[in-house]
Image (tube, grey):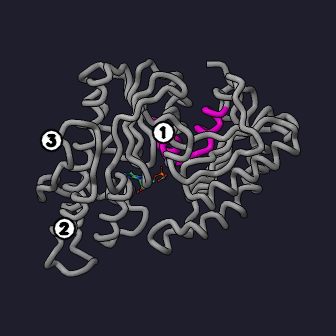
Amino acid sequence: MSAARLVLGIETSCDDTSVAVLEDGRTLRAHLIAAQDVHRLYGGVVPELASRAHLELLPKLVERALEEAKVRPADLTAIAVTHAPGLVGSLVVGVAFAKAWGAALGIPVIGVNHIEAHLHSASLEHGESPLPAVALIVSGGHTELVEVRGLGEYHWLGATLDDAAGEAYDKVAKRLGLGFPGGPVIDRLAPQGRADAFAFPRPMLDRPGFDFSFSGLKTAVANSLKGRGEPPYPEELVADVAASFQAAVVETLVGKSLRAVGHVGAKALSLGGGVACNRALRAALAEACGRRGIALRIPSPRLCADNAGMIALVGAWRLARGERSGPGLDAAASLEASGLPLG
Ligand code: KG4
Ligand code: ZN
């Protein structure tokens, strides 16, 4: 796919402020991601604090990224910015910044859908995907299984009916007294526990279709801790719960993803979102895809989580097709309101 030449990418949809400079849709000349630590104090993302931190961080990150890329503002060809979905107060910071810079520099601005960017983030390292492909997006806010037939050609296969996969990790970790975000801690502790210590459910795996549901699993974990008081718990118990919980999540995600691959006749499976950093999930998918001859495309951890590189990539592709956003570009909180075909 052809791409615009020097694109400044901006991502401020949740609690990571990120800026990228992408050349020819391929080379990341600079890529900065500032995770906002302040939310750890509250055990979750506080929207008001997130938008304030974006306001403070974004101008500094843009300046630094341009310096690293050895690019002057006047050299930029276009700006790509996440406009949906996400926390609206956070999205607005990036969108307003992009529009102001676009107007000042006289260059086009394109609003990029955050989920669409996750669908393609693996292409930054793996090149363009063989098609059709299936993408599994698993983050703190999303659990989506999508058939990808090309840029903008998507068919939604399934999504979570309640908690997102990352949210389940975070809530289970909180219940175990492990802090926020929970995914990385559970990932680290699970290998020390017994995956068969608790028989947690594999939600919806036995039902047809591609939807997920993680709230029952979260409740099953809470029930297993009933009568054991509050954290801190003995290390062995924490490791056993972490291992059993993770085994249930991984088996569910792998089972549904491979069913989707078979249903679509996909040649590749792409991953995105923070939970795609999970080592057990990566290993299980590598094994399952290897056996079936399916190309597995998992970005490195930096590109799994929220990042401006993927925003710049999709922006560069869309700009090359002549697309651009007008002055009416605005932030939209929900996936449904974001204008992406959800068919
Ligand atoms: O994509 P992301 O950085 O932000 C959004 O939610 O948009 O994803 C963050 C989520 C959190 O729920 C976090 O606990 C989870 O990804 N996560 C992981 C791992 N690393 C991050 N979950 C499981 N295993 C991991 N290694
Ligand atoms: Zn995300």
The residue identified by callout 1 is 300
The image shows residue 68, relative to residue 4, as above or below, that is below
The image shows residue 155, relative to residue 82, as above or below, that is above
Image mark count: 3
Q: Is residue 165 left or right of residue 326?
A: left
Query: Ligand 1 closer than 8 Å to the CB at disc 3?
Result: no
Type of the residue with mark 1? Ser
Type of the residue with mark 3? Asp
Residue 307 spot, x, y in % from top left = 58, 45
- Measured Cα–Cα span from mark 2 to mark 3: 28 Å
Name the residue nearer the viewer: 289 or 338: 338
In the picture, the disc for residue 206 is 3
Secondary structure at numbered mark 2:
helix
How dense is the environment of label 2, judged by Cα within 10 Å: few (below 14), some, or many (20 and up)? Answer: some
Secondary structure at numbered mark 1:
loop
* Residue stretch rendered in magenta on the structure: 299-315
The residue identified by callout 2 is 237
Give the overall secondary structure of the magenta segment.
helix
Decide whether residue 67 is among the magenta residues. no
Q: Is residue 262 left or right of residue 227?
A: right
- Measured Cα–Cα span from mark 2 to mark 1: 31 Å
Precedes in sequence: disc 3 or disc 1: 3
How dense is the environment of label 3, judged by Cα within 10 Å: few (below 14), some, or many (20 and up)? Answer: few
Precedes in sequence: disc 2 or disc 1: 2
